[in-house]
Amino acid sequence: MILLALGAWAWLRAAETGYGEFIAALILILTVFGLGFWYIFLTGLRWRTRFLLTGAAVAAIASIVLGLWKYTRIDGSIGGSGLPRLAWKWSPPRDAAAGALVVAFKPAAMDAIGNVSFPQFLGPDRSGIVHGVTLERDWSISPPRELWRRPVGVGWSAFAVSGGRAITQEQRGEQELTVAYDLATGNPVWAHTNRVRFREASGGDGPRATPTVRDGKVYVMGATGILDCLDENTGNRVWTRDVLREYNLQNIIWGKSCSPLLVGRLVVVTGGKEREKSLLAFAAENGEPVWQSGRDCASYSSAAVATLGGQPQILIVNGHSVTGHHPADGRILWEYPWPGNEAKVAQPLPLEPNLVLVATGYGIGGSLLRIEPAAAEQWTVTELWKNRNLKPKFSSPVRRGNYVYGLDDGILVCLDWLTGKRVWKEGKYGYGQILLVEDVLLIQSEAGDVVLAEAAPDGHRELARLPALPSKTWNNPVLAGDLLLVRNDLEAACYRLPLATGGASTRPAANASH
């Protein structure tokens, strides 16, 4: 039995699976039960001896379980597979290390960093692609330089970069904060507070969504459903909507996670747990309701804009479907039923004028859809292929040419999106995140390292690695010019990445000092 367990453990370490923690725990449990069965029925000892020792073992295990129940609490999970992380009940919450936020700082001059921007979730067009920056591939010769590092409150929000500020959401005590940090120094410039706290044992507490910045305003969706519009310079509230309460909707299990989408004069967010009002639009100027649409529950994905069949439309992955909506009034143009787990996170990926790739984890996989207009404003959805060759759980895949790159249960995959065939699968990065920077992948691994890898169909090649953060990281990385911003639920850091000779740079000759 022990040899079988050791063999299974060896297989687990070598296998291409993202469920290592869960499977390891299962192996341990099965080993204990197997040894118990062997001892009770196969040892040949006197029955009285067997029962006495078995009773003692059961009592010891029960004492341990009761002790854990009485003296520990679940403090999030160890990793993306969901294995709980235990903490003593009397230990401080994870956000206690950050302390209270003190805002008393004048922003640094813009010429210290240059006019760089990354205004929303996954970049300017939500594609996860950074254009106009060519990174140096050999970081051993030209290593990244850390500009600043600081503790932050808990949460899985990423940064939005605009006007020399890096803006994110975090939880400190009972305050859900939107905080603007000076991009050059990391010092807080302003903070807006809502006195709410989203609590969830498995995923962890705090806000999830990344702010969106446009035209001097910051749009933020909190984990409990509060949608704020803030002044980009001061953080003062322009308007607010308590979306779930106002529309009589329940929150989804792991909290509101949609980053607000700005399309025209509208700000668009998703709904709640009920299979209705899955997409909601408000006037960006004053927050007045404009339209509501949909007949599905919300997922953990965010709305995006694409032009399919010549028609600009809003794409959204819902809990059990994918839909395209007309931006003007929200009406559903087409719908693709997509059953399975509601915990869909990855963004829909437009590929050609009428093609969309959708993919998710939990064993579901992906599909390539052809979306075409028909007569009388009717649309058709054709499923070109469907398989489980790419199962992204928390991250969104990116496209380069005829290939898509994504994390399949924590393993990097190159997929031929025309056929759905997997070209290669290699490189264990856990449930991290991906950006495409010209011809290289910038991978934020779940363990905290940032990795530079080749985006090529002829095989996996890791080019460089940076130990950016020391603990579990689910937050998306941000690359604004040559500035890399990373954060998790404990700390944030900013690095200046080396550019290749002739690589684009938006910063001046003088470096920021810190």
Image (cartoon, grey):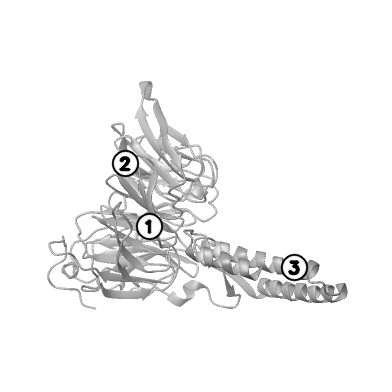
Q: Which residue is mark 2?
A: 351
Q: Secondary structure at mark 2?
A: strand
Residue 471 at x, y = what percent? Answer: 43, 71
Q: Which residue is mark 1?
A: 210
- Inspect the image, locate mark 2, and give the three-letter code of the amino acid beneath it: Leu
Residue 389 at x, y = what percent? Answer: 44, 47
Residue 56 at x, y = what percent? Answer: 79, 76
Circle 3 packing at 10 Å, graded few (<14), some (14-19), many (20+), is few
Please tell me the numbered disc located at residue 161. none
Residue 256 at x, y = what percent? Answer: 47, 53
Name the foreground residue: 28 vs 503. 28
Q: Quadrant of the C terminus?
A: bottom left
Name the foreground residue: 469 vs 164. 469
Q: Is 480 situated above or below 397?
A: below
Q: Which residue is mark 3?
A: 38
Q: Is residue 499 left or right of residue 293?
A: left
Name the N-terminal-most of marks 2 and 3: 3
Q: Is 220 situated above or below 43?
A: above
Q: Is residue 165 left or right of residue 491?
A: left
Q: Quadrant of residue 291?
A: top left
Any part of residue 99 in sight: no
